[in-house]
Structures are given as C-alpha cells and as structure tokens.
Amino acid sequence: MESYLVRVNVMIADKDGNRKHQDWEYKFDDSSKGIYDLRSEAIEKGRSLIDFFENGLPSDSQFSSQKEAEFKKYKGFQAYSMEIVFMNEDGDEDILVGEECLDYLEVEAQYYRRNSINVAFTNIENDGRTSEVLEKDLGFLMSFLNN
C-alpha cells in the first residue's frame, strides 16, 4: 500500500566526540484517506518537527546544522536530520527532501499522473532539465535541497 514516512535522526556528541543516536519514524498509511491527504499530513508533521528542533527547545539545547557539526569536528554538538519519504505500491522509497529530491519528486508526480489522482502539477527547471512535480508544498520540500 502506498504511504508516506517521516524519519528523524538525532545525533548528540559530547566534547570528546562520543556520539549517541536516536531515531523516530512516523508512518502515514490510513487506508480510509486518500494518498494526497496522507502526503499533506506527512509534510505537516515534517514542518512541526522542524519548528520544534529550531524554535521549541531551550537555548542550551540548540541543534547544529550538519555544516556546523563538521566544523566542530563532530564534538560538542547536537544535530538532526529528517526525511520525508513517498513509498509506492511496490515498496520503493523515494526521499522527497535532500540532494536527489528533484528526481524523487518527479517519480512521485508520475505516480499521481499514472493513477489519475487529480492534483495540481507544475514544471520546474534545474540544470537545464524540466521536471513535472506536485505543486503543493514545493517550496517547503525544495528548501532542503541545499541544506
């Protein structure tokens, strides 16, 4: 069954570089809802998690970006990463955020087209290539491209 996942990884390293990881996964697969509604719920969960990590913690619990963690040589930092994943009917996972997100956003749109799901599409250009993707929440998903 098609679904969406939101995965979060938190890594905390002490001043000596000893690391501790915590992982969470939220699955959106309620068969009584349409796939587009599940997508909206997953993206909203992603937004709320980002807001929590970036704004909802005490100042002494601030999270570093991946680049800051590298700069600190992976010592004395807290960082998180998040994936929003579209899982198709074959169980293939397409990660909709990150460096390869354009390819996966295109695969997701092709699924919606193939199954005649009535949603708004848009075309985006990247490196001279035009891709058709879902229009809703595109800015949010693309914000991860260079992070």
Image: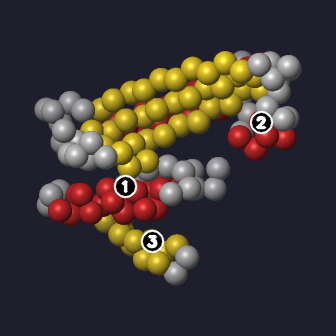
Report how far apart the C-alphas of labels 3 and 2 lie in the structure.
32 Å
Depth check: give the residue in front, 137 or 25.
25
Q: Quadrant of residue 119?
A: bottom left
Depth check: give the residue in front, 84 or 36.
84
Q: Residue furthest bottom?
A: 128
User: With 75 as the anchor, is 57 left or right in this view?
Assistant: left
- Its colouring scheme is secondary structure
Q: Which residue is mark 2?
A: 69
In the image, what residue occupies the spot 48% across and 40% down?
Answer: 83
Q: Amino acid at mark 2?
A: Ala
Report how far apart the C-alphas of labels 1 and 2 lie in the structure.
32 Å
Look at discs 3 and 2 and give the one toward the viewer. 2
Q: Which residue is mark 3?
A: 124
- Image location (x, y in percent) of residue 75: 82, 27
- SS at badge 3: strand
Report how far apart the C-alphas of labels 3 and 1 lie in the structure.
13 Å
Q: Quadrant of residue 16?
A: top right
In the image, what residue occupies the spot 50% across and 57% down?
Answer: 100
In the image, what residue occupies the spot 52% across and 73% down?
Answer: 126
Q: Which residue is mark 1?
A: 136
User: Visible in this render: residue 37?
Assistant: no
